[in-house]
Amino acid sequence: MADLNQPPDDFVNQFLDDYFAECEEHLAVVRAGLLNLERFVDSSIADTAQLDELFRSFHTIKGISGMVGLSPAEQLAHEMEGYLRVLRQGEALLSKEGFDSLIEGTKVLEEVINAHKTHAPAPAIERTIEILREVVAGKDTSVTPAKGQPEQTQKTEDKKQWRFLFAPSQARSEAGINVNTVRARLQSIGDILSTTPLVHDGDVLFELIVSTSASESELDALKDLELTSEPIEPEEKVEPITPTSGTSQTISTSVRVDLVRLDQLMLLVGELVVTRARLEKNLKSIRTSVTPVQWRQLQEVHVAFGKQLRDLRNDVMRVRMVPIAEVFDRMRFVVRDISRETRKQVILELSGQETEIDKFLVERLMDPLLHLVRNSISHGIESEEQRIAAGKPAEGHIYLRATTAGELVVIEVGDDGRGIDVKSVAAQAPEVALWDDEGRIDFDRLLETISAPGLSTRDHADRASGRGVGMDVVARAISDLDGSLSVFTEAGKGTTFRIELPLTLAITDALIATADAQTFAIHRSSVQEVIEIEPGSIKVLENNEIILHRDEVLPLVRLSRVFNLKDKKEGSLHAFVIGTGNRATGLVVDKVLGLREVVVRSLSDPLTDVPGVGGATELGDGRPILILDVMEILNASRHVYASQQSH
Amino acid sequence: MSTTSPAPTSEEFVLFELVNTHYAVRSAFVRRLEMLESVTPVPNATESLEGVVLSRGRIIPAVNLRVRFGFPKIPYDIRTRLIVVEADNRTVGLIVDAAREFTSLPPAEIQQAPQAIANLNGDYLEGIATISGRMILVLRLDEILKIADDLPAGNPVSTIES
Amino acid sequence: MSAENKRRILIVDDSRTMRRMVATSLSNIGECRFEEAANGLEAIERLVLGPADLMILDLNMPELHGIEVLKFVRARPMYQSMPVIVLTTKGEESVQREAMAAGASLYLTKPFSAIELEAKVRGLLAEAGDKA
């Protein structure tokens, strides 16, 4: 069946990143929403707000999937949306089969989208679509649900309703006051019940009805928004048009920032830091030209500036921190899935969701935690009968806890299951001593054994020993993040894995430069100045290249010569001024690309122990970049230049 | 109080190809097999160091085994693999022509290499095994990872027919 | 006409991917600058702050449905003749009729091709140009 409507790949490809990111956002909303919906199964109330939100999420996924030409996702989302339309229009109650089909449908939809992302074969969707259609067709229309407003009743007493009017204008917009920011601010102090555009005296205004328990003084803090406000008398109280339930938020008070933008922000802050350093230097040079009083004043301003810059830098770094809830919430869905698969009743207890971790870590933690949780449920938690026979509650418990301890973030994944069968592990690895002389389990050895290599080169799930699938993957992922993993287990009582991760990675400001089409990085702290060199300005003095810089002779060292790369023949060059006074040297590169904040990765292998190389990093495109050790380079250059002179 | 371990009946190996010859290294040392993506060259390093690569969040050295064994380099293709090995607290990638198979070998199967081959390969070779008529050169990983000189170019090992 | 002699095209859709695709689809049309709004309220605000030469309006948006936006905008004297293309999804014929009745110039059903969108936008801009 020729599909004439398929958009051309080269057009679509530029949007795929956005498409996947947006789908993931909506799927996260769907997951949370479905879990919220569970309590309404077979109940006579419906949470219309939640159904609305789910409907809209699938609707959007349907739309963009169609636009990028991913037809299976479009079709699946269409069926999901169809069932949700039926539910939200009150034409049917949410049955157990219906709920299950929504869960299943979401899972398959996720798989289809992921398969497209990883270029893997996509799962079949026909059966899922069939199930959804059956559910819609077989809907029980005998009882129509009543609209529910859960968790609303007890809270409305202490809240008042206010009417705000916002008049958009050019001046306000330039000051950053627009309808979106106004709504975000109001949302942070209460619930926005409605937003309506109005025309008054020929001008357009937005009327916002807000329910809030904020005091007059708290509302006063909003006065920079230039809103008019008046309380609404109890008789006039407005019925919420879109009641908000549990987790659904009509507006988020957070802004989606992609890491690229954040990196650029860091870059600007970094440049500010460099500029401040130059300012400091210039100030020092004029010290003798100003009076002591003037000098003191200048110093005060400069110090204040430095402090504010430091604060700015810390705050920008903190923007990268996100609550670990992002990761934990995903687990709720996973737990539900696996417990159904394994037919075990499992309760997930979360704590410390507000603990913040660097955004960098969020993606890297998903997989290891998923593995640990999956293993806990599959191998740790016993079946219902076994648990009852052991005097335990029928439902198994999985704990996910996060806290910070100094410079570390600690994450624990535990269960109250049967514990790791150490004897069985010992049988599989007889050469390892798992017990100490007093018969106590050596947990470090145990962990090492169950995370032993060799499992990753094959898919070999060894259930009996409780190793489970992927322990080595988990151990590897944690060590890649410079973290540590430990385990504690007690037969019959349960197992807990503890992950410790550094809160901040070794991050430094680095100047990025190219030489002969290769990219390098230099610690900003090694560099006094970055200068541009016009080709004609290089002179040769006693067989060394020099230029005149600030009326002084600056000897030059070409990175290309030290590294045996090709010199740049034409055009201007850049150089890093290293050192001061008569020790100053200019390290010449082809071009300085800019300043970036980078994560330093040590290059500890002896093979890479080469003079001039002091570490490596990568700028986010998967390609490693060497970090130069400038002192070694300057030292090495003396040999290079000496040998080049002997002709 | 440690228990003495019975001699292992069989060990697992990862097989790879280099210049139409089959080699084997113990699975226990192999972390994973990867496709080769960007390699960043390291200036003034030993010739067999192709450069560094990013693997699972870490930047590790990538050794071109062809160069290490004195063979000429060839351009990468879709069969080229990076075997990430770990030994002695070092993680290193080995660039080979192809790698896909795993096999079990009882230690008794690993015969000592004939004098001629052993001389050429220096300390890298632990022995030779024959599987389904194929000759497999079993390597000693620790020797390969040593910062020793690469074998001289023109090594005729490749001419061994199976 | 807008101050810089470039035509101002307002793209209103709550999906970022959609907005990007629309903007890119129209990038070959010269003398245009694009603005985006993620919801109907923002769209109205942007129109309050300045005239637009064309609006592409998604209907199914949270906060304020596209049809409400359209009705509100058409009621303003300045925007009675501004070309508006509404974006609908398959199987929503009644909504399409409502949109046309509310004053949409054209509708496009998702998924649509970039070429189709570009052609329709060019057509509407040319028409509007003739009338100016």
Image: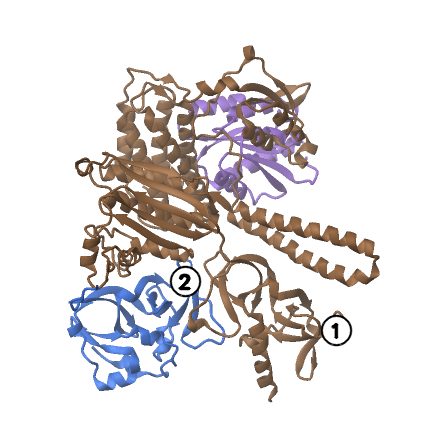
Which residue type carries mark 2?
Answer: Glu
Which hue belongs to chain C? purple
Disc ID at residue B37: 2
Of marks 2 and 1, the one in the foreground: 1
**A409 sits left or right of A441 in the view:** right
Give the image location of residue A90, x and y in percent: 36, 19
Chain identifier, colour blue: B
10 Å neighbourhood of mark 2: few (<14), some, or many (≥20)?
some
Give the image location of residue A94, x and y in percent: 31, 24
**Figure quadrant of the C terminus of chain A:** bottom right
Which hue belongs to chain A? brown
Q: Chain of mark 1?
A: A
Q: How many marks?
A: 2
Which residue in the rendered view is the most extreme toward the front?
Answer: A438
**Alpha carbon distance from label 2 to label 1:** 46 Å
Residue A122 makes an appearance in the image: no
Q: Secondary structure at mark 1?
A: strand
Residue at the spot 25% in from the left edge and 83% down from the top edge: B117
Residue A510: image quadrant is bottom right
Q: Are marks 2 and 1 in contact (CB under 8 Å)?
A: no
- Specify whether disc 2 shares its chain with disc 1: no
Disc ID at residue A360: none
Which residue type carries mark 1?
Answer: Glu
The residue carrying mark 1 is: A552
Residue A128: image quadrant is top left
Give the image location of residue A364, x and y in percent: 41, 51
10 Å neighbourhood of mark 1: few (<14), some, or many (≥20)?
few
- A38 and A58: which is toward the camera: A38
